[in-house]
Each structure stands twice: as structure tokens, then as C-alpha cells.
């Protein structure tokens, strides 16, 4: 099955700086890669996603890049704000008919004021 | 639109007891998922339903866990008997189809003592 590794596990940045979180996946047939933000005690919420026919996608301060050859994808947050502090999870969809999401282990992002 | 509803929000039981969780997905969503999220980890898929049929339950510990979605709407997840290692947040998610964004419920935090 799919295996997703996520780094780093914790990340602290100064407000206004950029943050980058990286994930690798094992199943070369995976074709959908969402990123979820989970604030303490709350549900995961989708913040951006990318499909395998696209190399980069941007939504305001958030961007995701995908390198299918290397089987890795990254989340980029620019001009970070304190409200960006949360746990971020990457995920990859398996190639089977069930299209399960396999999640990474999460990155605790702290934006220091 | 109303989100995914789950109850109870919190549950504390002793090991070897049984417990049941309930999920009401977003209206019209055919696909329903149950995830287990252990503290500090990403959600792990337990079971996926398409309407009232099971699509994938390969990661469900079937000796103690069971789930059903009899009428293709609400779903229940049961653990009997519970073990200490079952302490986790149980998240329900739904999507219009298995190719669409998954929306998560608030989760049920289970503590087994």
C-alpha cells in the first residue's frame, strides 16, 4: 500500500517568514495530494490540493508543488501569520478503486509573533 | 450546508468495555469514512463505505471493531472489547463521491483506562 513520509515534524518560523513542509510517497500511481490543516482539538480541514497532471498550484499565500518523478510534494506558506499555527498533514490517494487517503505524520507549525 | 456530525464528542471507558460512535454525513454524500487518529499521528483509515456497502475495511481490526451503514446515510462504529491502545480520536468523514474532497466531522475522543 501507499506510504507517506512528512518532514519536519515541528517547524517554528518568525511571523512574516515562509514555511515549507515536504512529503514523499511510495506509490507511483497515486494521483491526488491534499493538504489538511488541523488546529488544536478541531477537525482536519482541506487547505489546498493538487492532482498529478499539475506541477504547481497556488492559492493566495499557500502553494503546493509536485514532483512526480521524485515522488515528493511540498507545501509552501508565505508571509506567515500567527493564525497559521497548527498541525499540517499531507496525504496521497492510492491508485486503487477505493481511492483511500494515506496521511503523513503531521508537522506542528508555530508562527512566532 | 450542515457539516458532518458525530457523537458523542468524548467518551471514557474501562478496558474490555464496549463503545459505539455515531456519524451523520453531509446530506447527499455517498462515501463515508471512519479514521482513527492516535495522538501525534495522522488519521488512519479504518473503513470506507460507498452508500451502504463496504469498499475497504482492510485496516479495521475485525476481531474487536465493527461498523455499519445500513441505510446508506448514518453510520456507527463499535469497539468490543476495548483495549488501552484504542485510545484515540475517531474521525468520520464524507464526500460526494470517492473522487471528491473529504469533509471531516469534529471527532470522538476515546479514552480507555
Image (tube, coloured by chain):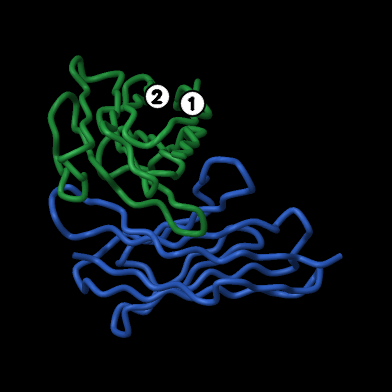
Chain colours: A blue, B green
Q: Chain of mark 2?
A: B
| Side of A67 where A56 appears, left or right | right
Q: Chain of mark 1?
A: B
Instruction: Give x and y (percent) for residue B75.
Output: 29, 23
| Side of A41 where A101 appears, left or right | left
Q: Residue furthest bottom?
A: A70
Q: Are marks 2 and 1 on the same chain?
A: yes
Asked if labels 1 and 2 touch by Cβ distance under 8 angstroms, the answer is yes
Residue in the image at 32% along x and 37% along y: B82
A102 or A93, which lies in front?
Answer: A102
Residue in the image at 46% along x and 39% along y: B113
Instruction: Give x and y (percent) for residue A87.
Output: 59, 58
Quadrant for residue A33, please give it: bottom left
Callout 2: SS: loop
Q: Residue furthest top?
A: B71
Of labels 2 and 1, earlier in sequence is 1
Residue pointed to by mark 1: B3
The 10 Å Cα crowd at callout 1, few under 14, some 14 to 19, many 20 or more, is some
- Count the marks: 2
Relative to B100, say whether A88 is above or below: below
Residue pointed to by mark 2: B26
A62 or B6, which lies in front?
Answer: B6
Relative to A24, say whether B76 is above or below: above
Quadrant for residue B69, please give it: top left
Instruction: Give x and y (percent) for residue B70.
Output: 18, 17
B20 or A53, which lies in front?
Answer: B20
Relative to A93, say whether A72 is above or below: below
Residue in the image at 21% along x and 20% along y: B72
- Residue B107 numbered mark, or none: none
Residue in the image at 31% along x and 73% along y: A25
Amino acid at each position: 500500500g501507499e506510504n507517506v513520509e512528512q518532514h519536519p515534524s515541528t517547524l517554528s518560523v518568525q511571523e512574516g517568514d515562509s514555511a515549507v513542509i515536504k512529503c514523499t510517497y511510495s506509490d507511483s500511481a497515486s494521483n491526488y495530494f491534499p493538504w489538511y490543516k488541523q488546529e488544536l482539538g478541531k477537525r482536519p480541514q482541506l487547505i489546498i490540493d493538487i492532482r498529478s497532471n499539475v506541477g504547481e498550484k497556488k492559492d493566495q499565500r499557500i502553494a503546493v508543488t509536485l514532483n512526480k518523478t521524485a515522488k515528493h510534494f511540498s507545501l509552501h506558506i508565505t508571509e506567515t501569520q500567527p493564525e497559521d499555527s497548527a498541525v499540517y498533514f499531507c496525504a496521497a490517494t492510492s491508485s486503487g478503486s477505493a481511492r483511500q487517503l494515506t496521511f503523513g505524520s503531521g508537522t506542528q507549525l508555530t508562527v512566532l509573533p | 450546508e450542515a457539516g458532518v456530525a458525530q457523537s458523542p464528542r468524548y467518551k471514557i471507558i474501562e478496558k474490555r468495555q464496549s463503545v459505539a460512535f455515531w456519524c451523520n454525513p453531509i446530506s447527499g454524500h455517498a462515501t463515508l469514512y471512519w479514521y482513527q487518529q492516535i495522538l501525534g499521528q495522522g488519521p488512519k483509515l479504518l473503513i470506507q463505505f460507498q452508500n451502504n456497502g463496504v469498499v475497504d475495511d482492510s485496516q479495521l481490526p475485525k476481531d474487536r471493531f465493527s461498523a455499519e451503514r445500513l441505510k446508506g446515510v448514518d453510520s456507527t462504529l463499535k469497539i468490543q472489547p476495548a483495549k488501552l491502545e484504542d485510545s484515540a480520536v475517531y474521525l468520520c468523514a464524507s464526500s460526494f463521491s470517492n473522487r471528491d474532497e473529504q469533509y471531516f466531522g469534529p471527532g470522538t475522543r476515546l479514552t480507555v483506562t
